[in-house]
Amino acid sequence: MRSHRMRRIVLSFIALILLLILLLMMNIYIGSVSLTPGQVADILFRHDMGSTEGRILWTIRLPRLLAAAVLGGALAVSGFLLQTFFANPIAGPFVLGISSGAKLTVALAMIGSLSAGRTLSSAGMIFSAFAGAAASMGVILLLSGRVRSMSVLVICGVMIGYICSAITDFVVTFADDSNIVNLHNWSRGSFSGISWGSVRTMLPVVGIALILAFALSKPMGAYQMGEAYARNLGVNLRRFRVELILLSSILAACVTAYAGPISFLGVAAPHLIKRMFGTVKPLVVIPASFLGGAAFCLLCDLLARTLFAPTELSISTVTAVFGAPVVIVMMLQRRGRREQP
């Protein structure tokens, strides 16, 4: 039985890696200007940035696909951490309003900087997003102490998200700046305009957060068995919860800072990974969620920019089309199990 489970895990990892490589290649080759494998190899080896194809590859497609992979994986891991914290598979940064809180504070910071004639730095965007994410998480935690039903808590999170989104839309609508069009596009969710500077900033932030999350695999596994079981194994629950909240907020904030709010990926990707691997062990699910979230986001971004080219859809629109049905199925399955005698 153990060998069968291990074989399933290994084969699932191989399938995920192959899928990720395929999607990376498709994102390189497919676009308004199609590139052949020979052209791509020639541009990469010669470091060609003078030709039109070279500029498209080096300044647009490569940073964009790297950002989509890194941030998609980060959002999936953030969702898994929140699902572990609340012991509910429906919890996620977008559903609980955490992404919307981050979106609000980043929009306010960006508008304030633009009004003062300055550009908000990458570090400033991440810090602003983290402040909003932490504030939204704080409200959710306060509500969780008074609301025992997870379904009611999820509804409260959705309402918080709507309130934050309404305030953001109001601020964006009446902001007076020539760059407000870019801010509006960002507020709907998009990887358009990602630069190498953004990639260089997000990589260490996401990388450190992922390493720390992976280091919590053992106490997370104990926490999944129940608070009493974790306490008996020596897990400091108060510190563990704080670490879990901080890491999930940092990951969600980094995603929102650069790509805006991305809907349902943080819920759907971890659920699909757990079904695919047949386990909820954090030691397996955390790296698998990162790979699965990266593949999910790359697919959605590819569809967003090519489906109705030259018009580009918001990334949140595409992720909602694929992610929302997964969430609906999850809720129906949970209700069906509760109604069984």
Image (cartoon, helix red, strand yellow):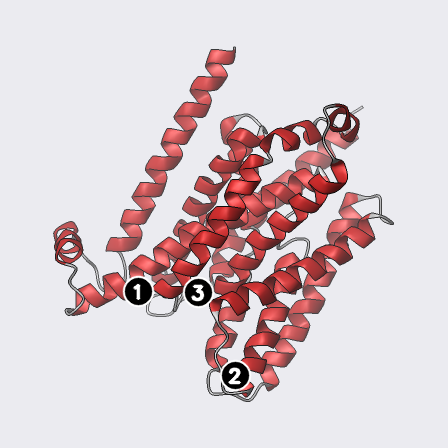
Marks 2 and 3 sit apart, C-alpha to C-alpha, by 26 Å
- Can you say which quadrant of the picture contains the C terminus? top right
Task: Mark 2 vs mark 1: give the one in front.
Answer: 2
Element under disc 1? helix
28 lies above or below 196: above
Q: Is residue 126 visible?
A: yes
Name the amino acid type tagged 1: Ile
Give me the residue at 77% from left, 44% from top: 150
| Mark 2 vs 3: CB contact within 8 A | no
The part of the image, by quadrant, that contains residue 43 is bottom left
Element under disc 3? loop
Most foreground residue, 185 or 145: 145
**Residue for badge 2:** 114
Instruction: Please state the horizontal and vertical placement of residue 239, each as a whole percent of the image.
Output: 72, 41
Most foreground residue, 312 or 189: 189
**Residue for badge 3:** 313
**Residue for badge 1:** 60
Q: Is residue 32 visible?
A: no
Mark 3, Cα crowd under 10 Å, few <14 / some 14-19 / many 20+, is: many
| Mark 2 vs 1: CB contact within 8 A | no
For residue 223, side relative to residue 11 (left or right): right
Instruction: Please state the horizontal and vertical placement of residue 142, each as a whole percent of the image.
Output: 81, 54
Element under disc 2? helix
Disc nearer the start of the sequence (2/1): 1
| Mark 3 vs 1: CB contact within 8 A | no
Name the amino acid type tagged 3: Leu
Disc nearer the start of the sequence (2/3): 2
Marks 3 and 1 sit apart, C-alpha to C-alpha, by 17 Å
| Label tally | 3
186 lies above or below 201: below
